[in-house]
Image: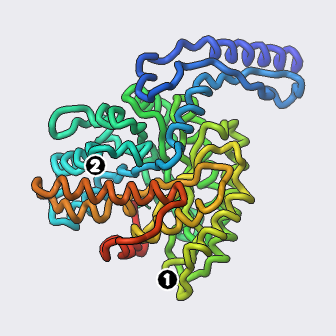
């Protein structure tokens, strides 16, 4: 009786697998958003399907495999990095408030229009992460934001997590929401032109981190990554180790090793294809309230040691967050990491460290748009040089040297 049941179960699993393989292709013409990208190519990987039948195999279709690899390589292209402009409406409101503007859709649209249409931005920026509102929004002169990005040779990306909430049973730590219904959202975002995704979860050193919080962060990232790849979006895997705390750089290193070990364990368990992901780590630095400060050389040594011990070379790109460092600090640290060849593209995915001077220069005034775009291009170019290991740090403004750390920062 048992064996008839398990045979029937096996047959059903094989039929399900075949049905997955036969699934019709998504809308193909949208693939043209990323230049030179091929259409959806079926490819297969084999996994065990039944715990009681070790030799039984089923087929898992990873139909976007080629496209994912191409997208990841495009984003991780020499001398370029990501502009993170995916602040939630609440966070964008804080940014606008800092220059005396109201948090209206029109003001958010005006600011994001300024960013995406900065002339020649695509020379330094390969991808832009958008908040959902922007993905579906037009610029102030009526063009789709996504179209403007694609014209600039910039791949549109989308923030897909639903933010952080308290993690019950932990030491006042958080977990990241957004898995429910994620696959329908990622499919819709792909159709709207997004080709990569971002999910930011956090780990707090002063609050632990507890084993529970690290496991939850890693598992959530891995589930999100598998779902995104299944919809043709390259997942950016971002377990941000917050800058908060008085701890030294060795403690950050120790926590980062633990976090990345767990993240890769669950990514593998979820059959995530490493060639089709991008990472967004924090650099290994002392806590923001630590009395010892680290030089770019120290940050680079610790961070590269971490990456070498945890990140497989199959991963195409490491795109750092800035996390509250000043614009210049983030650029100097990146430059230090690119003084010799790395197995991965080592680059940036900054929000604050690309936008700060730009936002202040704009101040909400139409007559300042050009100056603000120039400020953005200046930072983008500096980080492009840092990606190539050629940034000198000469001629930087005092504003760009100001730290942006905010204790307990909520993105
Ligand atoms: P910061 O560079 O301001 O840390 O932001 C990067 C980001 O996108 C966090 O998810």
Q: Quadrant of ligand 1?
A: bottom left
- Dot label at residue 115: 2
Instruction: Please report the residue visible at 53 percent of the width from the left and 88 percent of the height from the top.
Output: 291
Judge left or right: residue 227 versus residue 331.
Answer: right
10 Å crowding of disc 1: few (<14), some (14-19), many (20+): some
Looking at the image, is 235 positioned above or below residue 298?
above
10 Å crowding of disc 2: few (<14), some (14-19), many (20+): many
Q: Position of residue 63 (x, y in %)?
A: 61, 22
Report the residue that reaches farthest toward the bottom: 291
- Dot label at residue 289: 1
CA gap between label 1 and label 2 equals 32 Å
- Would residue 207 be visible to someone looking at this image? no
Of residue 18 and residue 346, the one placed in the foreground of this image is 346
Of residue 73 and residue 335, the one placed in the foreground of this image is 335
Instruction: Please report the residue visible at 59 percent of the width from the left and 49 percent of the height from the top.
Output: 345
Colour treatment of the image: rainbow
Image quarter (top left, top right, bottom left or bottom right) of the C terminus:
bottom left
Looking at the image, is 12 positioned above or below residue 338?
above
Instruction: Please report the residue visible at 54 percent of the width from the left and 12 percent of the height from the top.
Output: 24
């Amino acid at each position: 009786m048992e064996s008839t049941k398990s045979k029937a179960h096996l047959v059903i699993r094989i039929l399900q697998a075949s049905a997955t393989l036969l699934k019709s292709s998504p809308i193909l013409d949208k693939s043209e958003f990323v230049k030179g990208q091929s259409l959806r190519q079926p490819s297969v990987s084999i996994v065990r399907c039944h715990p009681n039948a070790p030799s039984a195999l089923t087929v898992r279709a990873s139909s976007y495999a080629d496209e994912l690899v191409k997208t990841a390589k495009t984003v991780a292209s020499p001398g370029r990095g990501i502009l993170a402009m995916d602040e939630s409406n609440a966070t964008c409101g804080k940014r606008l408030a800092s220059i005396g503007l109201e948090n209206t859709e029109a003001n958010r649209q005006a600011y994001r229009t300024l960013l995406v249409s900065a002339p020649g931005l695509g020379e330094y920026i390969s991808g832009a992460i958008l908040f959902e509102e922007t993905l579906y929004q037009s610029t102030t002169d009526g063009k789709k934001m996504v179209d403007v990005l694609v014209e600039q040779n910039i791949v549109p990306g989308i923030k897909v997590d639903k933010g952080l909430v308290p993690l019950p049973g932990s030491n006042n730590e958080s977990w990241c929401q957004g898995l429910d219904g994620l696959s329908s959202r990622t499919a819709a975002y792909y159709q709207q032109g997004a080709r990569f995704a971002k999910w930011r979860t956090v780990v707090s050193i002063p609050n632990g981190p507890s084993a529970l919080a690290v496991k939850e962060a890693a598992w959530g990232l891995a589930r999100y990554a598998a779902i995104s790849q299944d919809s043709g979006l390259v997942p950016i895997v971002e377990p941000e180790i917050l800058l908060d705390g008085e701890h030294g750089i060795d403690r950050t290193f120790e926590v980062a090793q633990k976090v990345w070990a767990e993240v890769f364990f669950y990514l593998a368990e979820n059959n995530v294809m490493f060639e089709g992901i991008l990472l967004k780590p924090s650099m290994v630095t002392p806590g923001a309230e630590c009395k010892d400060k680290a030089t770019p050389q120290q940050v680079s040594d610790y961070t590269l040691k971490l990456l070498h011990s945890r990140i497989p070379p199959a991963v195409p790109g490491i795109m750092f967050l800035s996390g509250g460092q000043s614009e210049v600090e983030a650029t100097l640290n990146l430059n230090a990491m690119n003084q010799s060849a790395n197995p991965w593209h080592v680059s940036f995915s900054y929000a604050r460290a690309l936008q700060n001077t730009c936002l202040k220069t704009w101040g909400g005034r139409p007559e300042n748009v050009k100056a603000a775009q120039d400020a953005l291009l200046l930072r983008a170019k500096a980080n492009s040089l840092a990606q190539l290991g050629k940034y000198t740090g000469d001629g930087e403004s005092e504003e760009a040297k100001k730290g942006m750390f905010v204790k307990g920062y909520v993105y």
